[in-house]
Structure formats: C-alpha cells, structure tokens
Amino acid sequence: MNISKIQELCKLYGFVPSKQYGQNYLINDGIVEKIVKAANLQSTDTVIEIGPGFGVLTFALAQRAKKVIAFEIEKKLTEYWEENKLSNLEIIFGDALKNLRSYVIHHTSYKVVANIPYQITSQILRTILELPNKPSLIVVMVQKEVAQRICAKPPDMSLLALSVQYYGRPEIVDIVTRGNFWPAPKVDSAILRVRLNPPNPTPNPPLVGEGVAHSNSSPYEGEVQEGVFFKFAKAGFAQKRKQLWRNLAEGLKLDKDKVKAVLNEVVGNEKVRAEELGVEEWGKIISNFKFT
C-alpha cells in the first residue's frame, strides 16, 4: 500500500493519523515482506497483530497464516474493517495492553507480528513477555535505538535488555529508515525479532550454557524463579551510578559482605556494575541467596 492509497483511505473515512497512538503507516511493501519473512509464517500459524490500521501488514499476514487476531484501538476504523472482512481475520477494537491476556490464553501456540507505536514499545513487550501463555516468536517494528538497547551485550546492558533476554533471544533483522512511513516519524526504526525460549519438559533444568536447550521462560526456571529474578534485577539497576553490590545490599536488605563475596565468586569482581552482566551471570548470582 503506497502513500497515495493511505491518504485516500484517510480522506474517505475521515481519519487523521494520531500522534497520541503513534500511527505511522508503512508505505513500502518491500518492508512488509521483510517483516513477514522474519516471522517465518506457516499455514497453521495463529498471529497476533497490534495496531493494524488500514491493514498494510495485516493483509500480508492473513495471506500466509491460518488466523490473524488484530487489536485496533481506533474505533473510527470500524467501518473500514467491516467492509474489508476476511474469513481468517478477527479485528478486536480496544486497548491491546488491557485485552491481550484474555484472548491469547485460548491459543496454545501463536506468534506476535506488528508495527507497534513507539511510545508503548516497552509496555507491549512487557505485557507479552509476562503472559502465562507466551508466543513462540515476536517480530515487531520498533524505534532503532530501542532495538539496539534490547539487543545489547555486557557491558552495555539495561533493565530492558535483561528483561527481554531473560525470556528469549532478540536480534535486529533490518534497519528501516523514517522515509518508509507516513507520516514520517522523527527517528529510524528496526525490525526486531525475539525467539522465545521453548518449553523444557524437565521440572528442574540445569543452568543454560552454550549449546544447552533453554527452559520454558528463562535459562533459570527451577533455579531462580521469575519474580525473584526481577526483584534482584530492578534493585541492581535502581541507581546506575552505584556498584551492583551496594544496590543489592541496600535495595534488598542483604548482607553487603555476602553480596561482595558472591560477586567475586561468580564474576571475579566485587565492584562490577549491573550493566556489565548478562542473564546467565545474574542467574548464578541470585541462586546464592534465599529470597522470596
């Protein structure tokens, strides 16, 4: 769908792209194909899309997947989607952040593929990754700098990077310049793919190293529970200027000498900072503490 077609549809339905909802439409079919290819869609797949708009990406997804469930917050597009119904497409009007959980719980296997608004990127990813029934794959268009932060490695980690990498393996598929959208945003974008860690049938899988299968939600399921992991992570990143031992000791009321000893044992440096550690190192550190 090119820019002229999008503008024609906006005029026809009395619609103006909203800055509030971050409505920047793709106008390059080649980019749409890159997103679809990154999702490796099969004819048996169920796909969740967030923000279909006029269906620039939606129609391409529906051609390849068994079913597409798209969440659209803009009710002004109701008439458009009533006139463009597809047998394998379900449009749900409302806030995806509020409605995702109730809809995906009925789907044992699905993928998330979307061009999501910049301002809710972190919220959307957190909502998806915290679902009890997670997707097998996430392919989303996000702000380039956010994608780079998510894919960062030590010593440039952030709480966002650690959070996403706890659940899966993120990678940047391609950079998409701002001229591929209408209205054009002020920044460039990136196609981000996150392969989520597949289920592991063993009740107490070992810590994950290179070449070892990932567990259901993290490499540390059974060793370090999700809630505990993120209590430590949030405390560790609470004050970036401080060394990790101090953040953990102060934030979680832990014995500072024990924290220092554990850091020395795991990473060989008691003065390490939170951004210098990856998921595996965090898991090893946390497993040394009894914490509920």
Image (cartoon, rainbow, N blue to C red):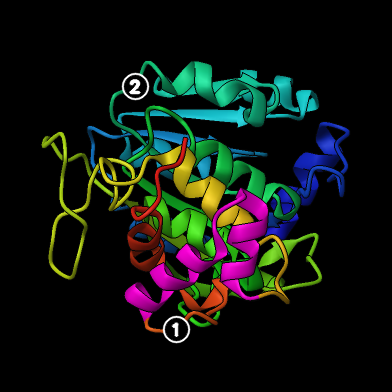
Residue at x 65%, y 44% (from the top left corner):
123
In depth, the one of 156 and 177 nearer the eye is 156
Per the image, the residue denoted by label 2 is 107
Within the magenta stretch, is there residue 208?
Answer: no
Residue 215: image location, x then y, percent: 23, 46
In the picture provided, is 5 more to the left or to the right than 255? right
Name the residue type under label 2: His
What residue span does the magenta drawing correspond to? 243-267
Q: Quadrant of residue 225?
A: top left
Regarding residue 139, the answer to whether it shows in the image is yes
User: Which residue is pictured at 51% across the width and 83% down the height?
Assistant: 155
136 in relation to 188, above or below: above
Q: Is residue 222 above or below residue 214?
A: above
39 and 281: which is toward the camera: 281
Q: Position of residue 188 (x, y in %)?
A: 68, 73
Q: Nearer the viewer, residue 4 or 237?
A: 237
Q: Which residue is mark 1?
A: 269
Element at badge 2? loop
